[in-house]
Image (cartoon, rainbow, N blue to C red):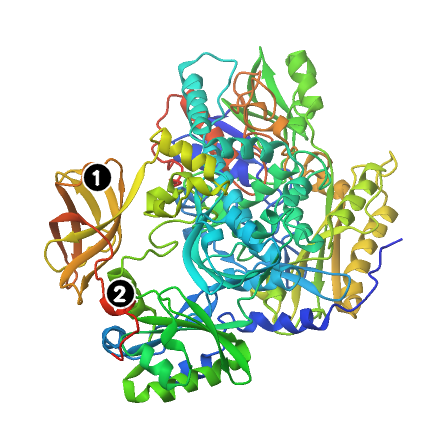
Amino acid sequence: MKAWDAIVIGGGHNGLVNACYLQRAGLDVLVVEKNDWVGGAATSRELTPGFLYSNCSYVCSLFRPEIMRDLELPRFGLQVISYEGGAVFTRDGDYLANYRDHDAHRREFARFSKRDAEAYDRYSRDVTRQCRFIQPLLMRTAPDPTSFRPRDLGELIYLGKKFAGLSAEEMALTLRFWTMSISDFLDEYFETDVIKANFALSGIIGTALGPMSPGTAYVLLHHYMGEVDGSVGAWGYARGGMGAVTKALAASFKASGGTIRTGTEVDHVLVRNGKAKGVVLAGGEEIRGKLVISNADVKRTFLKLVEEKELPDIFLRRVRNFKIRGSSGKVNIALDSLPEFPALPKDSPVYRADMHFTDSIERMERAYDDWKAGRWSADPFLDMMIPTTLDPTMAPPGKHFMSCFVQYAPPKIDGRDWTDADRDGFAESVIAQIAAYSPGFRDRILHMEVRTPREIEAEVGLTEGNIFQGELTFDQLLFNRPVPGYAQYRSPLSGLYMCGSSTHPGGGVMGAPGRNAAAEILRDLAKPTLHMSPAHDVI
Amino acid sequence: MNHHPTIKPPSHARTLAQSHFRTLRLGTPFQPRIDALGFKQDWYSWAGYRAPHSLWDEELEYFAIRSQAALFDISPMTKYRIEGPDAEAYLDRVTLRDVTRLKPGRVHYTAWCADDGFVLDDGTLFRLSPTRFRLCSQERHLPWLLDSAFQYDVGVEEETEAVAGLALQGPTSFAILRDAGFAGIERLKVFDLAEFPHDGTSVTISRTGFTGDLGYELFAPADKALSLWDRLMAAGEPRGIRAIGYTALNRARLEAGLIVANADFTTSEHAIRTDRLRMPDEIGLGFMIDPEKGHFNGRRAILEARAKKRLRHMLVGLEIEGNIPAEHAIVYYRRNQEVGLVSAAMWSPMAKRNIALASLQRPYGDTIADDLWVEIYAMRELQYQKLMKRAKVVPRPFVKLDRRTANPPADF
């Protein structure tokens, strides 16, 4: 029986990044994917004829440019297009826009508060300083502080030096940033509700916390440290939808000789004498592999794919306690025509940007209250956009694809599983909100896909539908992600590795976990990593 | 259950302002006149305004400053109106220089620092009355100014768009103002200001400027801008008045040895890299600090840095061999040790010398000022001509003109 050099479980973006790097290092790699398509949560699916849906992740910024270059993704069709900032609609019939132009941005804020308009520079300076501190950590394996290996000590010293290199003021800010609520953090800069709400949204996306929960300031940072071609903090659309990212990765992987088997669900990891030996498929077929790398989240990997008896107790307990909470859903809509928002001038660039309807932190927090009570938010927070205003490949001319990220959606409704009726009620809360700002909206809907945590978990495999494979709170970052002592992509089982967003540096379509895991695997195999670019300089 | 928005319309002014996204570069109140003279269509963004680099010929525009009179639109400068019984005490607390010694009808050049002693900005403070001031600066500081006003009986209002500003600079500037009918203009000494009637309202004229030349700055309500422009142009026509752009002004200010925020130093609220922050002593503004005047923002940190000799930088004027401008050249000690950077440089037509402003790491420029060199990379027909030229630290201003301070001012 053939034994692959490495088997990657799950063809999401991190699994594919990992597989690409291993294949290019000369390994014979197999990716097994349970769905009939690759992509995990980065897919473009034609769910109704002529319309491509970015039906999970929907925008691109965090994906590391070093990876795009190493794996030649442009050659395999990847293009990322920057878009204009965005807007929050206000209940009084106005809106607050974010414009890319610095002075337009200031003038827009000045419509609401002259003071806040002039506070933006200092806010932006402080956030940028923090991003620059974190950015170099993304493409490095987190040190293990309990180990005395020279490499871990070296990495710890690197971290320590970076921290010691900060001024006293920056150190204080760093600690505050990693622990504060986004609401408290914004209070230090801004006074206007809608302006604070405008920034706070980046602090709660994908997170089962409210804007007043400690730890959410870091989540904001996580959304700011990406870039589009050097423009740090910018977000863009992958042309052809987010599936373009994984399509390019899959093509790159195949071009270098890799093999992908779709429609192939792994039932469990084959373990002999504490060592991973391959995978057993749902149908019973056994595939042998010298190494197994799981792109699934840490709970799915160790609570479903590996037998409990193979794992140490403390490790298992920590995996069980790792927070991967469902907090969001998605409504994807095919539109017959571009919706109109009477609040917006007809030529507003906001049509080509992200749109929101939650104009105060208070409203966001109330939406979170619903989550705590075990129901979807009656007045949800939406991150809504119409990528087809910039990307002609996703819908027929004149027609549009709209992506609505929806928060909050609990993993269970009143302690029981989601039902179809719940799903429809959830969708209605979203459509009602949009329609309140866009008359006639319902009539434009041609087709709609509604994804609650139930659907996301069932299709993509993300536990509770958590988009980050684990919350991005400080207790689950760096050497604590996912489990202390196992933050370097290895597991208690020899030959079994992790490469998903449950690992450092966390979620978002970033690719860094997949790449970093490949670097560790190649280190264990004593193989060179010359094909892996070092992290770009932060100067 | 869904929370449907209750629609109460926003204020008319707020809705009206929505359309600004169609005008990414605003015109100033003088724009119709400047557009008509902007033959080169050579615009840049000055704080979001469409401002001219040059209108017709940057060199000739420079010579207009030095030979006749030049009209330069300073409306985009950030302006704050600071008024109230405590305005003096408040400004004395937030800015470096002693405001209690700034009399009504006077202007001074000052700077202000954050608590850590690093410079937020420099600018000019106009004392319009015992209780009313105008603060002009490059960057914006409203949150800081408002926060600092805590417990002072003072109002701070941003008035950049409401107030139009013009600089009239050059040897014939006095004669033009006199001929334009600003009676009593001859009484203004350097840094004096006064109100003069204009078009049913009044215009504030100060004998100030950014050129080191005889010159004035005029502030008027935005809706009186065009009539003010026309009045000056009509009176100035026989005396060679010309409108100019920033490139010419920038040359004149360098000859005068004046610094520009975020060109010659990085302001504290914009410095992403914390080693770019500068204390007043590090950018040549140490003269503003008056330890005797009582508490002011940044005082403790500044005095401590002085006492512990923790000042790391030094802004100096350089005179460089030859005539090739050394813009953004690296400064070396003994030709090989990197000790600083040139932030602005030019051949000075008035001094007939190759001049520059540079930031050096102390002790260079401070106690060690000899054996300094600059490495100039001059691109000539797609090839760098690399020159290593000797640089000498010299006092500023590079050009000192008696006519700037002469009383009464001369006609030309």
The reply, left or right, for residue B317 in relation to residue A300 is left
Instruction: Please identify the quarter of the rendering in which residue A210 is found.
Output: top right
Residue B205 is situated, as x and y percent measured from the top left of the image, at: 44, 73
Which element carries disc 2, helix, strand or loop? Answer: helix
* Label 1 neighbour load within 10 Å: few <14, some 14-19, many 20+: some
Check the residue under mark 1 and report the chain it is in: B
Neighbour class for label 2 at 10 Å: few (<14), some, many (≥20)?
Answer: many
Say yes or no: labels 1 and 2 on the same chain.
yes
Secondary structure under tag 1 reads strand
Can see residue B102?
yes
Percent x, y of residue B340: 25, 43
Between B338 and B261, which is closer to the camera in this rendering? B261
Question: Counting residues from the N terminus, which is met first, the one under dot 1 or under dot 2?
Answer: 2
Say which residue appears at 33% left-offset and 52% top-offset. B264
Indicate the quadrant where residue A354 lies: bottom right
Examine the rendering and report whether any part of residue B243 can be seen. no
Query: What's the amino acid at mark 2?
Result: Arg
Residue kind at label 1, given as amino acid type: Glu
Image location of residue B401, percent across then percent down: 23, 66
Mark 2 — on which chain does it sit? B
- Above or below residue B221? Residue B275 is above
Give percent across and percent down for residue B337: 18, 37
Q: Which mark is residue B251?
A: 2
Residue for badge 1: B338
Vertical arrangement, residue A253 with respect to residue A179, above or below: below
